[in-house]
Amino acid sequence: MEVTSYCDNLAMELTAWKAKMYDIVRKLDKMSTGEKEKVVPEVNELHMFIEELNDRIEKLRKECPTEWNPNELYSKADELRIKLDDVWETVSPSDVGG
């Protein structure tokens, strides 16, 4: 029962991360075309990260693997957070509805 509970909790946490990523993508989609061009690589990485989150969430829900290692995903999230900080420095807040 503990492993199942752990997998359920982790799936909920990853779903929350996925929602945050979607929110960021939606904000970036509101940018002007010129501003969007500056962040295309980061947006593509966000989409790949969201896809990876989807895969991990499905695996947790279906299989609940006992050898799960979330550190890899957390380190990828940290890298993405640093890149997004760089994006926000190059983008005007008014371009994303701020």
Image (cartoon, helix red, strand yellow):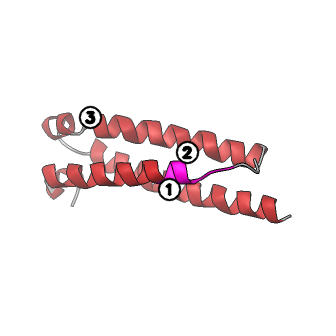
- Residues at marks 1 and 2 touching, judged by CB atoms closer than 8 Å: yes
Which comes sooner in the sequence, label 1 or label 2? 1
The tag on residue 53 is: 2
Residue 78 in the image: state x and y as whole percent: 39, 54
Secondary element under disc 3, as helix, strand or loop, is helix
Kindly report the distance in space between the C-alpha atoms of the residues bearing marks 2 and 3: 20 Å
Q: Is residue 17 magenta?
A: no
- What residue span does the magenta drawing correspond to? 68-74
Observer-nearest of 29 and 1: 1
**How packed is label 2: few (under 14 Cα within 10 Å), some, or many (20 or more)?**
some
**How packed is label 1: few (under 14 Cα within 10 Å), some, or many (20 or more)?**
some
Which comes sooner in the sequence, label 3 or label 1? 1
Residue 85 in the image: state x and y as whole percent: 25, 55
In this rendering, position of residue 3 left or right of residue 44: right
When the figure is inspected, residue 2 is found, relative to residue 92, above or below; the finding is below
- Kind of residue at disc 3: Val
The tag on residue 40 is: 3
In this rendering, position of residue 12 left or right of residue 40: right
Observer-nearest of 31 and 77: 77
